[in-house]
Amino acid sequence: MLTLERAKELNDSMVTEEHLRLHAKNVMYAMGAMADHFGEDRDYWMAVGYLHDYDYEKYYDSKRSCRYLH
């Protein structure tokens, strides 16, 4: 199972810009709150939230991006 510690290691290996790291943390906390609300595993969903833009810097394509998500 994905752990929050592993998610942070993975994200930090790919994400270099501070504003994107902050965004990842904000999404992580939101996902944790949603997990609490729905009775799900908080740590797992926080890890998923932390990784949601894992490859953004490397593979972002403005023509194919889901702009409405950010």
Image (cartoon, rainbow, N blue to C red):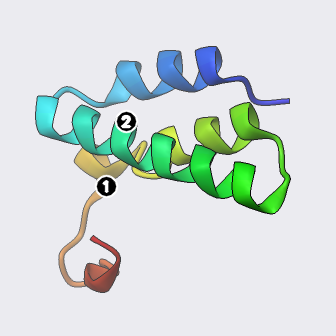
The structure residue drawn at horizontal position 27% and vertical position 45%, both measured from the top left corner, is 23
**Which residue ends up furthest to the front in the rendered image?**
37
Q: Report helix, strand or loop for mark 1.
A: helix
The structure residue drawn at horizontal position 49% and vertical position 42%, both measured from the top left corner, is 28
| Quadrant housing the N terminus | top right
Residue 17: percent from the left, percent from the top? 14, 32
> Which mark, residue 41?
none
> Which mark, residue 59?
1
Residue under label 2: 25
Res 20 quadrant in image: top left
Res 60 quadrant in image: bottom left
Q: Report helix, strand or loop for mark 2.
A: helix
Tag 1: amino acid? Tyr
Q: CA distance from mark 1 to mark 2?
A: 20 Å
Residue 32: percent from the left, percent from the top? 61, 44
Give the mark toward the camera: 1 or 2: 2
Q: Nearer the viewer, residue 66 or 4?
A: 4
Tag 2: amino acid? Lys
The image shows residue 9, relative to residue 68, as above or below, that is above
| Quadrant housing the C terminus | bottom left
Residue 13: percent from the left, percent from the top? 38, 19
Q: Residues within 10 Å of mark 1 (few under 14, many from 20)?
A: few
Q: Can I make out residue 51 in this image? A: no
- N-terminal of the pair, mark 1 or mark 2, is 2
The structure residue drawn at horizontal position 43% and vertical position 42%, both measured from the top left corner, is 54
Res 4 quadrant in image: top right
Residue 9: percent from the left, percent from the top? 50, 15
